Amino acid sequence: MTEAKPQDSDVNTLPAPIGHNGVLSRVNIPADMKGLSDAELRTLADELRAATIEAVSKTGGHLGAGLGVVELTVAIHAVFDTPDDRLIWDVGHQCYPHKILTGRKDRIETLRKGGGLSGFTKRSESEYDPFGAGHSSTSISAAMGMSVAADQQGHDKHCIAVIGDGAMSAGMAYEAMNNAGENKNRLIVILNDNEMSIAPPVGAMSKYLTKLVSKKGYINAREMGKKIVDHLPSPIRHAAKRAEEGARVAIGGGSLFEEMGFYYIGPVDGHDLSQLLPILRNLKESDDYGPVLIHARTEKGKGYSHAEASPSKLHAVKTFDVDTGVQAKSTPAAPTYTNVFASELIRQADKDEAIVAIHAAMPDGTGLDKFASAHPTRTYDVGIAEQHAVTFAAGMAAEGLKPFVAIYSTFLQRAYDQIVHDVAIQNLPVRFMIDRAGLVGADGATHAGSFDIAYLSCLPNMMLMAASDEAELCHMIATAAAYNDGPCALRYPRGSGTGAEVPESAKALPIGQGRIVFSTPCHPVQREGSQKPQGDSSASPQNDKAASVAILSYGTRLEEALKAAKALSEQGKKVTVADARFAKPLDEALVQDLAARHDVLITLEEGARGGFGAIVLEYLANNDLLNGVRVRTLTLPDTFQDHNDPDKQYEEAGLVVNQILRHCGD
């Protein structure tokens, strides 16, 4: 990594990072901040920003969001008594500065590495992470629960939730606010607004009143304006009232929160400690406030010009050069599954005007930014609102459109009731494109797509597919486009494909039909109660025991199955590898044939227990087709796997060739 050099722009003249002299070198935990002056806290914020940039340049991870909350992080920890006071970060991708200040400074360069710090807040990692995160819009509910618990247990503590404006688009945030406004518990919600265009406060009077309304004695202040205005001379009474309303309401935004029972403060400059510190100190000194919302206006990537100029591109990054902002590039051997999906969906939409695409605030991650460029009037971003996305798609399907809903597996979990109630029960042809199916490396357990096979396969009317390579993905997208008999789901993983040639013209597959992809000559095996085929002069069945293996793969672990098959065949064993393609409807003829002709049948999937392997085993057991065949279901382990290098995760899960081979013998 090239050492950062001073730049002409102030935002690139970064203070010394961790390990150098400075205020940050004296701060190991938030308690160390209590004796710092406001000027020292401003210096600390500058150094913390530099340390965050330096750390993420070496580890990769989320950059822009963390840089946008540096001053908020410093102010909260300087004023409140964490960890006794509870600080909840929504989503958690902005928590790197928080981790540096809370006893993890010396480990920050292990971020997102195996055995290192998580990229999100994690209860088991630190007492300063009172609630784990990874998905959005959970912070207000959790903080309210902690506030109620404090009251129930007689504890005097403050509970602070920091939530972004994007996360506020999800219904759960409003459910929590509605409940909090009714209960009137002591709760501070900081709205980290880094995108919405909101008018600035109304001059110096507004800034003064914004500080004033947070002071003790005025907190329960629906009467605040009246108390101030009644003591002002008549000529300036109306001007002061308008300024106070502008500070609290901000062109209508505050009135919404106040109608929900919150006392609204803002908007304030989320990068100005001279505004943040007095407000938070006033709240801490008050013991009679109810739910308060502080509207903090911030900027993603603040203090680093490359991130400021491209907040989307530098939201989540690989390792990068601090001077230039240029990220390390690896030359993929094949296009990513996400890009293959986007390209094929565009081709299908070119031919079929009924096709529309929906995503939940993830245009780049799902590849639908490319679809939007090709078909802008047929692309819908619903915000972080997966529940709405699914029912929105159901409404489209009910009227004859062909909605493709592209949502990560882990986020689709948030809309399960809508999948059941609004789609499956009504048998509406919504097409679920499940990206990030399976393990996701450095993002860890909160983002792993482990459960979609299990939670979708149990639903009547649902058709399920999994692509084993890029070509199969294209054919399955064509299959989904042509399928109108009910809902369907197609899963595919994160990252690059296998290098399979993408077809120029994808074709719809026969529903519920798998394929044999590898086979060595395999003699029928004598089962108890069966008859040996006449004319069979082959070796006795006993000689084939533990030598006849079938591997039935569902999804992209097919490559490992083929490696195992090669190793077995080189040992002289007879082996068949099949690509199931469909989990539902199951290719029963294929499963029956594999079970009848082999001693060992291994199912292989990158999903949790209760998925594809369970479907196969249930079919064989219910139809009395086991007859001595040993069935082994290889799935993800019954644990939440920590973040790690993907290859190591697969090894931990037992889904690589060596572990597959262990299940092929006696």
Image (cartoon, helix red, strand yellow):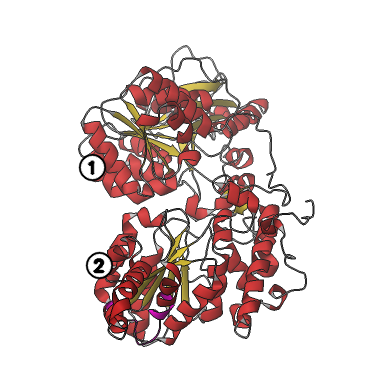
Q: SS class of the residue under badge 2?
A: helix
In this rendering, the answer to whether 249 lies above or below 649 is below
Kind of residue at disc 1 = Asp
Q: Which of marks 2 and 1 is in front?
A: 2
Q: Residue 259 carries which label?
A: 2
Distance from label 2 to label 1 (Cα)? 31 Å
Residue in the image at 64% along x and 27% along y: 566
| 10 Å crowding of disc 2: few (<14), some (14-19), many (20+) | few
Q: Residue 422 carries which label?
A: 1
| 10 Å crowding of disc 1: few (<14), some (14-19), many (20+) | some
In the depicted view, which residue is nearer to us: 595 or 525? 595
Residue in the image at 47% along x and 29% along y: 342
Q: SS class of the residue under badge 1?
A: helix
State yes or no: residue 211 in magenta: yes
Q: Position of residue 186 (x, y in %)?
A: 35, 79
From this viewpoint, is residue 304 visible? yes
From this viewpoint, is residue 644 visible? no
Q: Which residue extends farthest top?
A: 535
Question: Residue 97 sits in which quadrant?
Answer: bottom right
Q: Where is residue 508 in the image (x, y as percent from the top left)?
A: 39, 19
In this rendering, the answer to whether 148 lies above or below 175 is below
Q: Where is residue 549 in the image (x, y as percent from the top left)?
A: 54, 30
Name the N-terminal-most of marks 2 and 1: 2
- Main SS of the magenta part reads loop
Point out the stretch of residues depicted in magenta: 210-222
| Side of 301 relative to 235 (left or right) | right
In the depicted view, which residue is nearer to us: 559 or 518? 559
